[in-house]
Image (tube, grey):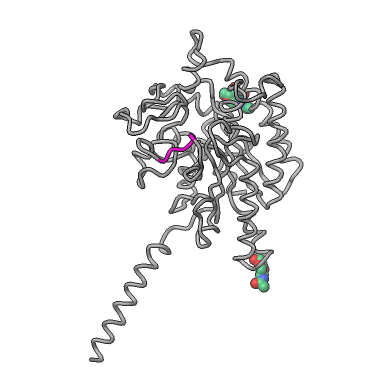
Amino acid sequence: MANAKVNLFSICIVVVLMQLGTFVVVGKPIVPCYFIFGDSLVDSGNNNELKTAAKANYPPYGIDFPQGVTGRFTNGRTMADVIGELLDFDEYIPTYATVTDQQINRGVNYASGAAGIRDETGSHLGGRISLDRQLHNHYSTVSRLFKLQRNKTFTGEYLQKCIYVVNIGSNDYINNYLKPTFYTTSHMYTTKKYAKVLVRQYSKQLKCLYDLGARKIVVFGLGPVGCTPAEISIFGTDGDSCVESINDAVKQFNDRLKPLVDELNLDNLDAKFTFINLTSISLQQQGLGVLNGPCCQVRADGQCVQNTHICPIRALSIYYDGFHPTDIANTHIATTSFNAVSPMDASPYDISHLIRL
Ligand SMILES: *[C@@H]1O[C@H](CO)[C@@H](O)[C@H](O)[C@H]1NC(C)=O
Ligand SMILES: *[C@@H]1O[C@H](CO)[C@@H](O)[C@H](O)[C@H]1NC(C)=O
């Protein structure tokens, strides 16, 4: 009898330890927490419950992702997912829509497909969480952390150690300026003035992130939007390989964003902002000799047709649909932003240096 009791007891202990093991016995991430802001390039499912055409929670999205369809706008991982792996997080950062009290101290993903720096951006597609709203949601997270951790000093110091990635602005072109029938911006501004107006608003938003305690902030510049299959099919290339007028417009934004990052570093000496040059990183990809067309059959809005036939070897394509990079392209972007190949890729720091500062 006594023996049976002992055995039962030890079995319970083993079961409890095994259950703990699946959560606790894992490598520690390099930083305690990681927050993600942005659009469909880094959205991992925040749009699933929204009424919008800009969602990706259907096949063939997620075909190469361990959990299958999640709302990620790609076949596998986003660039934010891969950065999370390089930071040694054992799980992907949960969406704001689903994050629990147990998970929230590791970080939150606020990103939303079709969202922009400007509030109206993407509205013709339906609901989306603009950058202002994402910052508002982060304010709620910070309040929640202050309550959960019950020590203001501790939470303040904790938030300073996190990595914050912001990847937004493409939709302020794709789903705003370049859609003159839905939006007034191209009637109001030249591309030069628009870049200036966008960067001025972005500047306030990054300052707001700083005010919410962020001190290590990675700001992604815009990639070559004029080289996406969707923009090429809408505007044509006039013999070039990309829509140069779009790349020129986007370049004006990038050329103002990098000096903004330098300025933010000068004005806030206790913070480190860094700029990732997606144009330079993408140029290296073109050199890899991979395919430029979309991997799935695309709808008029550039997203995959549901259950469509897809290319058999995703690793040969840069674009999965009309706009979004494949897992392999995202991996290249993430690893290069983590460990820059050329000084042009990340300035003043790549992410591997930023985490050590
Ligand atoms: C609050 O956190 C700070 C910083 O981690 C620590 O030094 C202090 O002892 C904590 N206070 C309490 C009451 O636990
Ligand atoms: C990004 O890299 C490209 C290619 O190397 C370069 O021409 C461009 O000036 C860079 N942009 C910024 C804002 O530094």
Magenta-highlighted stretch: main secondary structure? loop
The front one of 41 and 124 is 124
The front one of 98 and 94 is 98
Give the quadrant of residue 12: bottom left
Instruction: Single out the residue that lies furthest toward the top.
Output: 239
Residue 131: x and y in percent read 62, 40
* Residue displayed at 54% across by 40% down: 112
Give the quarter of the figure containing the N terminus: bottom left
Residue 189: x and y in percent read 71, 21
The front one of 299 and 235 is 299
Q: Is residue 357 above or below residue 10?
A: above
Q: Is residue 7 above or below residue 199?
A: below
Horizontally, is 75 left or right of 54 in the view? left
Give the quadrant of residue 289: top left
Give the quadrant of residue 349: top right
Residue 5: x and y in percent read 27, 87
Residue 243: x and y in percent read 53, 16
Instruction: Single out the residue that lies furthest toward the bottom.
Output: 2
- Write the start and end of the magenta stretch as one range: 53-57
The front one of 73 and 335 is 73
Q: Quadrant of ligand 2?
A: top right
Horizontally, is 29 left or right of 66 in the view? right
Look at the image and say whether residue 271 sits in the magenta stretch.
Answer: no
* Residue displayed at 33% across by 33% down: 307
* Residue displayed at 41% across by 41% down: 57
